[in-house]
Structures are given as structure tokens and as C-alpha cells.
Image (cartoon, rainbow, N blue to C red):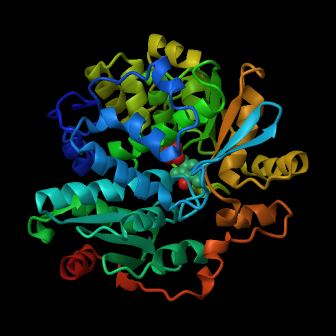
């Protein structure tokens, strides 16, 4: 399997190279050159298999033989053994035909664990094979940092440095990062804000000389392996509900669109999906684009669903590439315009997208209403991100006879603030985390200067 860039100028890469690379050198994102088919027989044969075995079968063509089958099976099994539910991603039936796909049973209680538990292990495998070491750097305002740390804590060939703004992340989110005491995990509290931290990480990727030749790896949602890992749960959920005999629909709380793009890949592989619904919070670029063909940036709004607070939706480029029939030049022109002024999609690709996708945006007041309403109707406490999905699914689903699967992207205890605001007494952390507030922490406070951060990384890496 080869991977090509959405901008058409960067060299095609193998799976191993694409996992180690992240963004393409032409500013585009890598996608598989061909989309491997999932036949009806292949889907039918997955009924009753474990999540790890379905994962192995769905991902195998993307790995393209670059990891031998036995090793890849072991990597996948280990990645999902870290989840606290035997089904890994259980389906929870809310009413006659609406299901929650619970993606929050991993170590940090959000769906990003599904991909990052796997990515860390794949990176470690390739680095060991090459006899190389690598450094991961990332900036976080909460969610991704802890999932990346949990995914890399056991990796011998990786050192991970995660920057967070000092005193500006919640105590639970900080402790999910700082209580991981592994020798290869370094938490840096920057005396500045998230943008300062982000800028230092970006500058470090742009000029990696401070690492004397050691590779710097990105684990953000543009890494292809994260998309690949997420395709699996769409397949597993649909098979559990009767695919390939029966269609299903999915509703996905969305921001950078990495989660939903994985669902679209499952559809293109052959999964019978009737409808995809994009749920957004007040940061609604995806909804405005689809509903009004208003593909433009707006100022960031801080919402009760903070992991969906974005201005630009980076993985949407991958969907545009498909909607434009892989015309890299047209996609490049559109995205260059979008960077500087409001843009619009061409008629044909937009019409194409509207046949499969619908969208809905949910503001903070509505999130609180939905948490109350869903609890009253189903006894479930939704986290604020999942609440946007619940509402969007009810509002814009096209056919109530087709099972609707709303992706529950976080455990409510992780975002207890919104739940309390909705009038509930709070949500306890699950048993494996209930001593989080007593665990020993380790982190280093540094001034917000590139020089101090890079010196720390260069000195501490093993
Ligand atoms: C990251 C995240 C999202 C958004 O996912 P994208 O892949 O960026 O669309 C939604 N909910 C939660 C809880 C998240 O952490």
C-alpha cells in the first residue's frame, strides 16, 4: 500500500514512512493510494469476532505487509487489552433505534485512546526495527496530551514531551498527564497560554537541529495511523447491528474531522452506511460549510465541549480530496483561498457530500438541555461532546427505521463541569482512576521561551 498527498506534490510513501512522517512536505495530508474493499463476505465473517480480531482484519491491507501478521496481531491485542470493557467499544441501546457507541473505556476516558494506544505501539515497532529512537512533542489544552502519554508510556524507543499551559488546564486533565511516572514521559508546564505552547511545538518541527538528527514525530490527528485505527469501530458497530444485511447511520461529534473521516473510509471500503451526521458545537465551520456552503474561518468560541473548540478542521481536507475526485490541484487552490478569505465548494462536490452527510450545530445552552433531557429519557449521563451528537442525531436523521449510532466520544466524569452545570451532582471517576487526585505528580515548569524548552528536550531525552 502506498500513500499519496492531497496536494499532489509530495512523494508517495509506504505505510512505515507515512506513520513516521505526519504532514506531507507539500502541506497536504496523506491518504491511501487505493481504498481496499471490504466485501460482503468479509463483513459477514466478522460477526461474533473479538474487537482485536476485527481490528486486525480491517487494518491489515493498510499496513500492506510491512508488519508481519503475527506481530501485528500482538500489537493490536496489546493495544486493546488496555481498555476496561471486554467489548472495547460497547454499544449501548438508548431507545428503539438509537445507539451510543461508547468509545471512552480507554485509559484516559476519551475516544482518542482507541487510536493512540495503537499508534504508540506501531511507532515503537518500526523504530526498534530501524534501530532508531524518536522524540514526540505536542502541545495540549487537555485531551490529546494525556491520550498520547498513555499510548507511549511503554515504548522503549520513544521519549514524549507534552507542553501544557501552567495552571490553565483542569486538575483532572493535568493529573491524567503528570501522574504517569514512566522514564520516557516528560510533562512541561509552560508559563504562558496554549497558543505559546503550540507555537513552540510548531517551531520545533520546523527546525529540528536542536535534536542533532533524532527524528521528531507528530501524533496529532493528521497521522494516518490514527484514522486507520478509527475505521475499525465503525465496522465493528455496524457488524454488531447486522451489517452487511442491514444499513446503519452514524452521528459523530466533530472538530478536526479525524473521527468522521475514518467513518467515511469505512463507507468507501464497502460498509453499508445510509447517512453520516456531523455534530458540531458553536465552532460550526463544518456545519456552515455543508449547510450554507460557507467555508470560512470564524473566531474561536470557548464552549462546554472544549475538545471540539477549533477554528479550522484539518482532516476535512481529506474529505475534500475525495469529493473533488482526487483533483489535488483543485483542493490546493480551494485551501489556499480558504487561508486568506471566505471560500466556497464547487457545486458538484458539495452536492455529492450532501447526498451522504447532514449536519447540525449545538450551542452551550442546548448542550445543558440535552444532558438533562437525555438523562430523563434514557437514564444515561452524556458528556457535553456526546450531547451535541445526541441532539444532532435526533434533529437531522433522515430515516428512523435505520439504526442510528451516535459516537460517545468521552466519559462524563472527564467533563464533570458541564454535567454539574446541567444540575446533576457530578459524576464519579471510574474505579481504575478513583485515586487520581492522590497520585504522585511529576512535571517541570519552564518559561515560555523556545530556547528553554528546546534545551530541556535535548538534555532530557534518553
Ligand atoms: C477530539 C475530540 C472530538 C473531536 O474529534 P475530531 O476527530 O477532531 O473530529 C470530540 N469529542 C472529544 C471528547 C474529543 O476528545
Q: Position of residue 223 (x, y in %)?
A: 33, 46
Residue situated furthest top in the rendering = 348
Image quadrant where one finds the C terminus: bottom left
Residue situated furthest right in the rendering = 376
Position of 368 with respect to 432 (left or right) is right
Image quadrant where one finds the N terminus: top left
Name the foreground residue: 63 vs 262: 63
Residue 396 sits above or below residue 376 on the image: above
Give me the residue at 53% from left, 44% from top. Answer: 50
Position of 256 with respect to 387 (left or right) is left
Q: Position of residue 199 (x, y in %)?
A: 33, 62
Give the quarter of the image for residue 62: top left
Name the foreground residue: 15 vs 211: 15
Name the foreground residue: 179 vs 422: 179
Question: Is residue 208 in view from this perspective?
Answer: yes
Position of 400 with respect to 135 (left or right) is right
Give me the residue at 26% from left, 26% from top. Answer: 33
Q: Position of residue 432 (x, y in %)?
A: 61, 73
Position of 253 with respect to 142 (left or right) is right
Give the quarter of the image for residue 67: top left
Q: Position of residue 128 (x, y in %)?
A: 18, 61
The tally of labels here is: 0
Give me the residue at 29% from left, 23% from top. Answer: 34
Residue 399 sits above or below residue 458 on the image: above
Question: Is residue 222 in view from this perspective?
Answer: no
Give me the residue at 70% from left, 60% from top. Answer: 412
Amino acid at each position: 500500500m502506498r500513500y499519496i498527498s492531497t496536494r499532489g506534490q509530495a512523494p508517495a510513501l509506504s505505510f512505515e514512512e507515512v506513520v513516521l512522517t505526519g504532514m506531507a512536505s507539500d502541506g497536504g495530508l496523506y491518504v491511501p493510494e487505493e481504498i481496499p474493499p471490504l466485501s460482503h463476505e468479509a463483513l459477514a465473517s466478522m460477526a461474533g469476532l473479538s474487537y482485536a480480531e476485527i481490528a486486525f482484519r480491517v487494518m491489515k491491507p493498510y499496513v500492506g505487509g510491512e508488519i508481519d501478521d503475527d506481530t501485528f496481531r500482538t500489537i493490536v491485542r496489546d493495544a486493546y487489552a488496555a481498555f476496561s470493557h471486554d467489548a472495547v467499544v460497547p454499544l449501548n441501546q438508548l431507545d428503539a433505534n438509537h445507539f451510543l457507541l461508547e468509545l471512552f473505556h480507554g485509559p484516559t476516558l476519551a475516544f482518542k485512546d482507541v487510536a493512540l494506544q495503537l499508534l504508540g505501539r506501531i511507532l515503537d515497532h518500526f523504530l526498534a526495527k530501524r534501530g532508531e529512537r524518536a522524540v514526540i512533542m505536542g502541545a495540549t489544552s487537555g485531551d490529546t496530551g494525556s491520550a498520547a502519554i498513555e499510548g507511549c508510556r511503554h515504548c522503549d524507543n520513544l521519549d514524549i514531551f507534552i507542553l501544557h499551559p501552567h495552571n490553565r488546564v483542569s486538575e483532572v486533565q493535568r493529573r491524567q498527564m503528570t501522574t504517569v511516572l514512566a522514564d520516557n514521559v516528560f510533562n512541561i508546564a509552560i508559563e504562558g497560554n496554549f497558543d505559546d505552547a503550540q507555537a513552540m511545538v510548531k517551531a520545533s518541527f520546523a527546525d529540528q537541529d536542536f535534536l542533532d538528527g533524532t527524528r521528531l514525530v507528530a501524533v496529532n490527528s493528521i497521522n494516518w495511523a490514527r484514522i486507520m485505527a478509527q475505521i475499525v469501530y465503525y465496522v465493528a458497530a455496524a457488524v454488531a447491528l447486522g451489517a452487511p444485511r442491514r444499513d446503519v447511520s452514524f452521528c459523530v461529534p466533530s472538530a478536526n474531522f479525524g473521527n468522521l473521516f475514518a467513518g467515511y473510509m469505512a463507507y468507501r471500503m464497502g460498509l453499508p452506511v445510509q447517512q453520516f451526521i456531523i455534530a458540531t458545537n458553536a465552532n460550526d465551520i463544518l456545519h456552515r460549510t455543508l449547510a450554507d456552503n460557507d467555508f470560512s474561518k470564524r473566531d474561536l468560541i470557548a464552549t462546554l465541549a472544549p475538545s471540539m473548540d477549533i477554528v479550522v478542521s484539518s482532516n476535512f481536507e481529506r474529505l475534500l480530496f475525495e469529493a473533488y475526485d482526487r483533483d489535488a490541484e483543485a483542493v490546493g487552490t480551494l485551501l489556499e483561498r480558504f487561508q486568506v478569505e471566505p471560500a466556497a465548494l464547487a457545486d458538484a462536490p458539495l452536492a455529492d457530500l450532501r447526498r451522504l452527510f447532514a449536519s447540525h450545530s449545538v450551542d452551550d445552552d442546548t448542550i445543558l438541555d440535552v444532558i438533562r433531557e437525555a438523562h430523563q429519557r434514557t437514564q444515561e449521563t452524556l458528556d457535553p461532546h456526546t450531547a451535541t451528537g445526541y441532539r444532532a442525531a435526533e434533529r437531522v436523521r433522515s430515516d428512523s427505521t435505520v439504526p442510528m449510532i451516535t459516537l460517545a466520544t468521552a466519559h462524563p466524569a472527564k467533563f464533570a463541569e458541564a454535567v454539574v452545570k446541567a444540575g446533576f451532582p457530578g459524576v464519579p471517576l471510574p474505579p481504575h482512576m478513583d485515586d487520581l487526585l492522590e497520585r504522585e505528580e511529576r512535571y517541570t515548569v519552564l518559561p515560555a521561551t523556545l530556547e528553554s524548552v528546546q534545551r530541556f528536550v535535548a538534555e532530557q531525552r534518553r
